[in-house]
Image (spheres, helix red, strand yellow):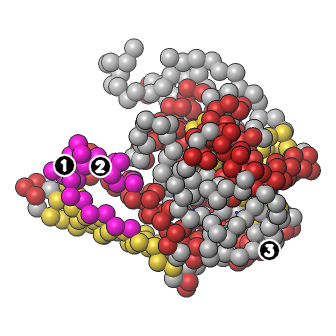
């Protein structure tokens, strides 16, 4: 049923803060600045380019999402963040080489003005990186310093609201432990410098504690532990993750639902990548790769449901590899060999060779997540995990006891129906008009 929600208007400025100001973050910031200057289009952004159908098909109401939802205007965004390398956003863009130099030259002064704050970093969690632009102190002191950074940033840039999106490197694979169980045990862990609390969790804690929503673009745990989820609920703050769904996994979650919809079997799915950016270098470390492997592997099982369909997917062999290959830079190549079978068990093969640009695919997701998390806060959405944003993630975080939805089209339906619900429009069931009330 449609209901009217009170939504605070998007007055004033929104600060988007990214821990990690490497390829994804700098491509996102430079892209928004180029779009504001009328130099480029926000391609890949659902909030900026997408339309949404409202009401019955006969009504022919299909506004742009950005005209339907009271989102923050791109003109009213301020950018900030933290990194272990003290280089401006312009230098970061040049280093990662994603956007064209002549475009960057046109927006250079704005990019040069964006400089990272000192990071919370510990090489134990990202073995391949060493940095000097790093804060010192106990983990609790570091969390407090990040909170102070946010207060200072908000004041300096005259922002009304903040959002944090983790664009930092992938940390080593960590499991939940007793430290992560309750807010009290977590805060004690911060005071005791617990090794179970990596930097990504320190930023997440600082954000949630400050009433700032947090999205996790990497596969590490981040806010995905009971203590931080509880804190988010108590503070009424939205959290979501994990791991931006781009490149190979995006294509996988487009193809796999199609096979299942037509009851085609899958015997094997071999995915391999070459990429040469810093992300690729970090993922060359087996402990960081383990975090990534977990999020990449989970997708097929969740979509294909081998327990329900043992004849079709019970023996599926799924392998994922990432190979660091410097000459390619950010231009990843992802190959998939898919062995499928059809009527009477006859085998067939599909080969996908996706020559993509990693950060070009990820940047619009940072924008959408920041704008939608901010909208959720202003619309008074309940705090905690924002499942409606699963559309953007490889490994969507869901409340305990629920399974994650990986099918891109179910995720999209959920996203758009939540948008309709927020705005007091009827959700769309796709029943034919003879059956609709
Ligand atoms: N590009 C994509 O398509 C994509 C998709 C899914 C996930 N991701 C994830 O997004 C993240 C960013 O990717 P990228 O290509 O920009 O990588 P990148 O290496 O270019 O940038 C990451 C930046 O984070 C910084 N950093 C590391 N630890 C930090 C900390 N504790 N605090 C502050 N800064 C820190 C690094 O110095 C680096 O500048 C990675 O975790 C990656 O796995 C990217």
Residue 132 - label:
3
Specify the quadrant of the image occupied by residue 210: top right
Closer to the chain start, of discs 2 and 1, is 2
**Relative to 27, is 223 above or below?**
above
Q: In which quarter of the image is the C terminus?
A: top left
Residue 209 appears in the figure = yes
Residue 331 - label:
none
Closer to the chain start, of discs 3 and 1, is 3
Q: In the displayed orientation, state which residue is furthest to the bottom.
A: 327
Q: Around disc 3, counting alpha carbons within 10 Å, would you say few (fewer than 14), some (14 to 19), or many (20 or more)?
A: few
Q: Are marks 2 and 1 in contact (CB under 8 Å)?
A: no
State the extent of the magenta-drawn residues as a range: 298-320
Q: Is residue 105 magenta?
A: no
Q: Nearer the viewer, residue 360 or 226?
A: 226
| Residue behind mark 2 | 304
Q: Around disc 2, counting alpha carbons within 10 Å, would you say few (fewer than 14), some (14 to 19), or many (20 or more)?
A: many
Answer yes or no: disc 1 within 8 Å of ligand 1. Answer: no
The residue drawn where x is 34% and y is 48% is 303
The residue drawn where x is 7% and y is 55% is 344
- Residue 127 relative to residue 261: left or right: right
The residue drawn where x is 50% and y is 36% is 399
- Residue 104 relative to residue 367: left or right: right
Whole-percent x, y for residue 57 in the image: 44, 28
**Relative to 337, is 367 above or below?**
above
Which-is-in-front pick, marks 2 and 1?
A: 1
């Amino acid at each position: 049923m449609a209901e009217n929600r009170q939504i605070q208007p998007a007055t004033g400025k929104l600060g988007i803060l990214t821990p990690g100001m490497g390829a994804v973050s700098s491509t996102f910031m430079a892209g928004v600045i180029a779009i504001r200057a009328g130099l480029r289009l926000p391609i890949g952004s659902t909030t900026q380019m997408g339309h949404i159908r409202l009401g019955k098909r006969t009504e022919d109401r299909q506004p742009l999402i950005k005209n339907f939802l009271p989102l923050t205007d791109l003109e009213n965004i301020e950018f900030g963040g933290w990194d272990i390398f003290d280089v401006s956003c312009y230098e970061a863009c040049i280093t990662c080489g994603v956007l064209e130099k002549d475009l960057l030259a046109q927006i250079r002064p704005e990019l040069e003005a964006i400089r990272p704050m000192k990071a919370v970093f510990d090489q134990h969690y990202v073995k391949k990186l060493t940095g000097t632009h790093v804060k010192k102190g106990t983990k609790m002191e570091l969390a407090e310093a990040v909170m102070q950074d946010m207060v200072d940033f908000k004041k300096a840039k005259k922002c009304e609201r903040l959002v944090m999106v983790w664009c930092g490197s992938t940390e080593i694979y960590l499991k939940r432990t007793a430290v992560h169980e309750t807010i009290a045990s977590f805060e004690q862990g911060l005071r005791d410098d617990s090794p179970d609390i990596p930097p990504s969790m320190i930023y997440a804690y600082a954000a949630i504690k400050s009433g700032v929503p947090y999205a996790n673009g990497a596969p590490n745990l981040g806010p995905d532990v009971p203590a931080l989820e509880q804190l988010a609920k108590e503070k009424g703050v939205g959290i979501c993750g994990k791991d931006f769904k781009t490149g190979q996994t995006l294509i996988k979650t487009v193809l796999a639902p199609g096979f299942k919809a037509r009851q085609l079997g899958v015997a094997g799915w071999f995915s391999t990548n070459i990429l040469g950016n810093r992300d690729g270098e970090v993922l060359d470390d087996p402990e960081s790769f383990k975090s990534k492997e977990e999020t990449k592997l989970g997708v097929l099982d969740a979509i294909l449901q081998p327990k329900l369909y043992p004849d079709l997917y019970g023996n599926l062999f799924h392998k994922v590899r990432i190979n660091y290959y410097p000459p390619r830079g950010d231009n990843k190549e992802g190959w998939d060999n898919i062995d499928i079978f059809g009527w009477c068990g006859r085998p067939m093969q599909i080969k996908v060779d996706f020559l993509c640009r990693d950060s070009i695919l990820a940047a619009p997701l940072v924008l959408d997540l920041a704008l939608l998390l901010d909208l959720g806060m202003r619309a008074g959405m309940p705090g905690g995990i924002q499942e409606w944003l699963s559309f953007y993630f490889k490994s969507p975080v869901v409340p305990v006891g629920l399974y994650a939805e990986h099918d891109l089209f179910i995720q999209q339906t959920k996203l758009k129906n939540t948008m309709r619900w927020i705005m007091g429009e009827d959700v769309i069931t796709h029943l034919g008009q003879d059956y609709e009330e």
